[in-house]
Image (tube, helix red, strand yellow):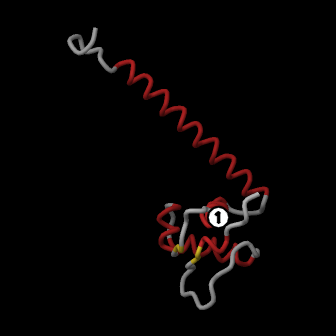
Amino acid sequence: MGVEDGTAGRGFDALDARLIDAVERLGDAGRAMLRDAAKREGLSVTQAQLLLRVATPTAGPQSTGSFARWLEVSAPTVSDAASALVRKGLLEAPLGAADLRVDCREHQSAPR
């Protein structure tokens, strides 16, 4: 068995398929958890994702466009979500900002 009879890699193909399936299920579960948590807090999924990104320790200053690319939505959608978060007191918009340019480091909470 092996390269000569064309069976080489079949075990890996089955393993790859199972791993891909498992990762997809984990992603689905994560999205469902985020959706449920956002709903409990009165947030849209986009608003929750935006807050998570702002709280990411490695995130530096971000523009509306960079958030839009990361969230895979339009810049106006990010702007609307950010405005809603500002109204809810969960995010602060910089004074005089033409777009929502957030320095994520300023919005990180202290480790618990």
Is 109 placed left or right of 73 in the picture?
A: right
Residue ID for mark 1: 55
Q: Which residue is at a point 57% across and 79% down the rendered structure image? A: 100
Residue 83 picture location, percent across and down: 66, 77
Q: Is residue 27 above or below residue 18?
A: below
Q: Which residue is at a point 49% across and 61% down the rendered structure image? A: 72
Total number of numbered discs in the rendering: 1
80 or 67: nearer the viewer: 67
Q: Residue furthest top?
A: 1
Q: Residues within 10 Å of mark 1 (few under 14, many from 20)?
A: some
Quarter location, residue 86: bottom right
Quarter location, residue 26: top right
Q: Residue furthest bottom?
A: 96
Quarter location, residue 47: bottom right
Residue 87 picture location, percent across and down: 73, 78
Q: Which residue is at a point 78% across and 60% down the rendered structure image? A: 41
Q: Is residue 61 above or below residue 4?
A: below
55 or 41: nearer the viewer: 55
Q: Which residue is at a point 57% across and 43% down the rendered structure image? A: 27
Q: Is residue 74 above or below residue 112?
A: below
31 or 51: nearer the viewer: 51
Q: Is residue 27 above or below residue 13?
A: below
Question: Which amino acid is tagged 1?
Answer: Ala
Residue 110 picture location, percent across and down: 73, 64
Is 109 placed left or right of 104 in the picture?
A: right
Residue 69 picture location, percent across and down: 47, 65
Q: Residue furthest right?
A: 40
On-image quarter of the N terminus: top left
Badge 1 marks a residue whose secondary structure is loop
Is 33 placed left or right of 60 in the picture?
A: right
